[in-house]
Structure formats: C-alpha cells, structure tokens
Image (cartoon, rainbow, N blue to C red):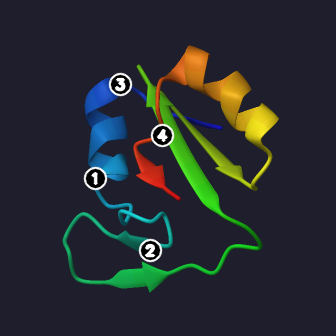
Amino acid sequence: VYLYKNPTVLEEVASGIGKDGSSYQNKSKTKVIEISWVSEPHFFKRNTMMVQYIGENENILKLLTPYLGPQFVGF
C-alpha cells in the first residue's frame, strides 16, 4: 500500500507505471526501470492510495476490486 499527499501526486506516480505493471518510467522520462515480479502484478488506486498486489489468487483480487475499483495496470 502506497499513500500519497494528494490525488495529483498519486496520478503522477501512477502514470509512470507500464501497462503490464513490469516497468516504471520516472517523471522526467529519462530512465525506464524494468521489474521482474515473482508473480503477476496488479495495481489499484483510489483517492490518495495505490495498492499493489503481486499474485494470482482470484479471491484476493475479488476482495480488492469492490473497495478500490478495477486495476489500472497489470495482468
């Protein structure tokens, strides 16, 4: 769970996460970081909170979605 000062900061950070959740590009667009997860990445956001779940457990995904909405990036 990542908490941000306001929704604008959250959106700024979230916009740098690659569509599949396996890369991040910093704000200045000068560097891309590739990430290898142990399982499938899922990212959710709501208000000033971003939640990252790395896994494939459908029950966990079903628990997160009603509270956070659909994932915005990931598998």
**Extreme residue in the front direction:** 58
Amino acid marked by disc 4: Gln
Amino acid marked by disc 3: Asn
**Of callouts 4 and 3, the N-terminal one:** 3
Q: Which mark is residue 15?
A: 1
Q: Position of residue 42 (x, y in %)?
A: 58, 50
The N terminus appears in which quarter of the rendering? Answer: top right
Instruction: Estimate the spatial distance between the alpha carbons at disc 4 and disc 2, rounded to whole Å.
Output: 16 Å
Look at 73% across and 68% down and name the residue there.
39
Look at 69% across and 28% down and name the residue there.
62
Amino acid marked by disc 2: Ser
Left of 68 or right of it: where is 53?
right
Amino acid marked by disc 1: Ser
At mark 1, the secondary structure is loop
Q: Which mark is residue 6?
A: 3
- The residue under label 4 is 71
Left of 54 or right of it: where is 14?
left
Few, some or many residues within 10 Å of mark 4 (<14, 14–19, 20+) = some
Mark 4 or 3: the one toward you: 4
Few, some or many residues within 10 Å of mark 2 (<14, 14–19, 20+) = some
Mark 1 or 4: the one toward you: 4
Mark 4 or 2: the one toward you: 4
Q: Which mark is residue 23?
A: 2
At mark 3, the secondary structure is loop
**Of callouts 2 and 3, the N-terminal one:** 3
Instruction: Estimate the spatial distance between the alpha carbons at disc 4 and disc 3, rounded to whole Å.
Output: 19 Å
